[in-house]
Image (cartoon, helix red, strand yellow):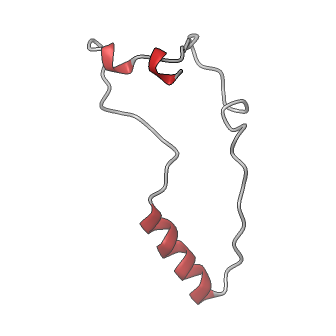
Amino acid sequence: MQGHLEHDKDTTLSAAFVVSLKTIRVLTAAAATLGWDLWTEDFKRVNLLADRLPEPVYTRIPPEAG
């Protein structure tokens, strides 16, 4: 994927499953204060369980990655 080369597409909307460290700290503090139980989940396979995309997506490793 070379999204930086796709100038004709609208790239203003994107989604990423990333949480800031500040958010994690606030939620952890709230959980400790309120006595909530915390647990973790493994999301390594989340994309395998997602709905199929309407068109195929092909990727390649950049040469500088080795």
Q: Would residue 13 appear left or right of 57 to someone viewing this image?
A: left
Query: Looking at the image, which residue sits at the far front?
Result: 66
Position in image of residue 26 (x %, y %): 47, 75
Q: Is residue 55 above or below residue 46?
A: above
Question: Looking at the image, which is closer to me, 42 or 51?
Answer: 42
What residue is at 73 percent from the left and 33 percent from the top?
A: 49
Q: Quadrant of residue 15?
A: top left
What residue is at 73 percent from the left and 50 percent from the top?
A: 42
Q: Is residue 8 above or below residue 4?
A: above
Q: Would residue 18 appear left or right of 3 to someone viewing this image?
A: right
Q: Is residue 50 above or below residue 24?
A: above
What residue is at 56 percent from the left and 76 percent from the top?
A: 28
Q: Quadrant of residue 50?
A: top right
Viewport quadrant of the C terminus: top right
Position in image of residue 38 (x %, y %): 69, 72
What residue is at 47 percent from the left and 17 percent from the top?
A: 62
Position in image of residue 59 (x %, y %): 54, 15
Query: Looking at the image, which residue sits at the far left?
Result: 7
Q: Is residue 1 above or below residue 27?
A: above
Q: Would residue 60 appear left or right of 35 to someone viewing this image?
A: left
Badge count: 0
